[in-house]
Image (cartoon, coloured by chain):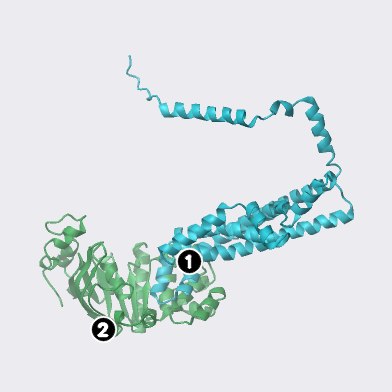
Chain colours: A cyan, B green
Amino acid sequence: MDSIPRPRPCLTCVLGALACFAAVWASFAWLDLPFGELFAASALTDMGRFVGAFFPPDLSPAFLAKVASGTLETLAISAIGTVLAVVAAVFLALPAAGRFGLPARAGARLVLNFLRSVPELVWATLMVLLAGLGPFAGVLALALHTAGVLGRLFAEALENSPAEPEAALRELGAGPVSAFCYGVMPLVGAQWLAYALYRWEMNIRMAAILGFVGAGGLGTILYYELSLFHEARASTVIIAMLGLSVLVDTVSALFRRGRLAAQ
Amino acid sequence: MSFNLAGVSVVHRNGAVALEDISLRAGRGERIALIGPSGAGKTTLLRLLAASLKPTRGQLELLDTPAWSIDARALRSLRARIGMVHQSSAIPPRQRVVTAVLAGRLGRWPRWKGLVSWLYPLDPAGAQRELARLDLGERLFDRCDSLSGGQLQRVALARVLYQQPELILADEPVSALDPTLAELITRLLNEEATRRGVGLVASLHAVDLALRYFPRVVGVRAGRIAFDCAAGQVSEAMLAGLYGPVPGAAGENPEADRSATPVGTAVPLMCR
């Protein structure tokens, strides 16, 4: 009996699976990855010696003070970078949400795409060339990339919020600024704040790395100590980065819980 | 005079005729209910009266002002004198009740005052006064999303009362409410309009409420005024004509509705 219905053979699926396998195999062949050497006995002892050099971390008071000031610098870079990004994002999101006509919308979206598509580290490298080594370059780098990300998120929140409240206020004679504050901000404000805090959290982590290209903060210290093979000191900096990350996660979790409880 | 429409037509950009040759006038303090099937043009008519839609043809005077031959500033201050009770969706859920009510005067306040009051309510006593009249005084500083549908509709009403308009409009203010609340809101609207001596135009789906609370009832059908009567003169036959099928037309197609026999022929009596 051939009355049992059968699915039609899917030629595309078979070809797609084969193509994936071929791509993975070709990648291995192309990169020539020495996985075998990684797990050889000699490699393992080398690795053990390398990792061992990181312990114990350098806890001398002078160096701890330096790491503490680097941590503060990292926090400050992320905070100022995020605040600047929020301001720029608001001003770009308004035209990007189509509030000033279609040409302005297209222009603002182009700017946002550009800001967003260049990663923070690339912006940092460019800003170091432009503004010199130091935290200012880090602030600019974070502000530029984050403005691109937040601008798009803010614009989407604007476009997805219902239009009635603002229209109702325009109908009773309110000006455009008042109508926006009373009719749109209550709808998008909380979402904007949540996006901004989330990006700040990411920027704290990113600010710790930006120092690798000379843009200040913990990364600058880490890069310096690693290039001099001061593993013990590098280990202190890495622990500080880890601590900062855990702190940010904890605080943000507490904050979110508090906000949820408040509602 | 509240308003005067003479030969007003509204044609949408896609060519659909929303209102055709409407002539309607109301003196100060007149309370009018607009009834008629969905899509008849009641909302369009209210938007004309709110000075938020420009008629394609005809004369339109609101509060003795020719609404569309004045400059933008004058138009804004005209709009500040006309209050529209919206459905509750026009109130942002995360806003506090006091802010939502104070927003009613944004058209009268200078911009700085509106912005300061946005951050810190400047006239909570004024908002409280209107809310207390609607039995909502104790919810002044609550957030709007903690209110029930009926309470939210009263906030929308309090906003319009705080605006102190000279003409109150309401676009189906009670269609989302249960019958008891619908009656309460309709009664409050009429009481406040009477107390202040201002005009009131409300579109309603509940014909019984329209006949019971409004002295004057205007039937709208297929973009035209079917009848314009005192509430006592509205007959069963007129209502049947208003809501019944349009002869020779499929109800779904508005174009066909317009080209059908004029509605006036189906309605036996024109009061005005």
Image side of residue A101 versus residue B55, left or right: right
Image side of residue A214 versus residue B167, left or right: right
A233 vs B135: above or below: above
Q: Which numbered dot is residue A184?
A: 1
Residue A125 sits in quarter: bottom right
**Nearer to us in this view, A175 or A100:** A100
State the residue at coordinates (34%, 77%): B168
- Secondary structure, mark 1, is loop
Chain letter belonging to callout 2: B
Q: Which residue is mark 2?
A: B27
State the residue at coordinates (74%, 56%): A217
The reply to whether residue A117 is in sight is: yes
Residue B199 sits in quarter: bottom left
Three-letter amino acid code of the residue under disc 1 = Val
**Nearer to us in this view, B61 or A88:** A88
Q: Residues within 10 Å of mark 1 (few under 14, many from 20)?
A: many
Three-letter amino acid code of the residue under disc 2 = Gly
Residue B165 sits in quarter: bottom left
Q: Nearer the viewer, mark 2 or mark 1?
A: 1
Quadrant of the drawing holding the C terminus of chain B: bottom left
- Secondary structure, mark 2, is loop
